[in-house]
Image (cartoon, helix red, strand yellow):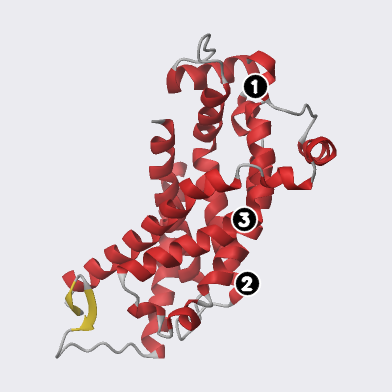
Amino acid sequence: MVSCLRLFPYSAIHLATYKNIVHLHIDELGDISQWRAIVAGGLAGISAALATYPLEVVETRLIAQNCKEPTYRGLLHSLSSMYRNEGLQALYRGFSLTVLGAVPFSVGCYAVYVNLDKLWQERHVRFTSLQNFINGCLAAGVAQTLSFPFETVKKKMQAQSLLLPHCGGVDVHFNGMIDCFRQVIKNKGVTALWSGLTANMVKIVPYFGLLFSCFEMCKQLCLYRNGYIISPLSYKLKPGVDQSLGPYELQEFKRYLRNRKSHKAQSSSIGNRW
């Protein structure tokens, strides 16, 4: 239940933030450089994690606790108990690893994305729902493999608590992030940083596949409702509709997005002043 409550806002914030950052950095032809795309993906992941991280910590604690003698009783009790007994920092314990892990995760996703045209031998705007699902799975598989050591240490930091039996059931005891890496490698070996990767793949890979394919389907639906394509299930263009968008129009659209952001900031400033 906690996982579902976390994933809904996480996915929405992630996609919305990524698209907004990309729109601010596209050039006159609608393209964006590789490094800016990677940075956009990383910042989007960090923003989404910042908003939902306490729910992830609660989820880990509920899993780590003793079911016969539970320390926490549900979401609200977990949040209030952790805040009261351990302080606000406990709800963001290990967040720095999310920031560090966002870099290899974004690099992995983009490395797959830029090679999709070669894989399918066609432009990515013509991919079917099945192709989009496979693309999401491939991107998630590569990205998760690269960033999983950070995920492993983060989970151990989230679970470790003196209020839980056996300090949350962690297999190594540590003081801080760097010491956790050191203790895991010293006692379990380097490969222990990827322990549980297979089980995590079973959960994450289809999730990103569905997320990616559903996102593209929603884009198709919007194009259909606005009269650009003949069906929400196909990218076949509607006859008689001007599909062209020149460089000047793209530049105007980019300027519009920047002006809208500036207008919102000014409105917020005036509202706070009064």
Q: In this image, 219 relative to 36: left or right?
A: left
Circle 3/circle 2 CB separation < 8 Å: no
Identify the residue position indicated by label 1 in the image.
Answer: 168
Under circle 1, the secondary element is: helix
Q: Where 175 sits versus 112, above or below?
A: above
Q: Residue at x 52, y 12 (%)?
A: 70
Q: Quadrant where the C terminus lies?
A: top left
Res 2 seen here: yes
Identify the residue position indicated by label 2 in the image.
Answer: 35
Q: CA distance from mark 3 to mark 2?
A: 20 Å
Identify the residue position indicated by label 3 in the image.
Answer: 145
Mark before the other along the chain sequence, 3 or 2: 2
Residue type at numbered disc 1: Gly
Q: In this image, 136 relative to 49: left or right?
A: left
- Foreground disc of the pair 2, 1: 1
Mark before the other along the chain sequence, 3 or 1: 3
Under circle 3, the secondary element is: helix
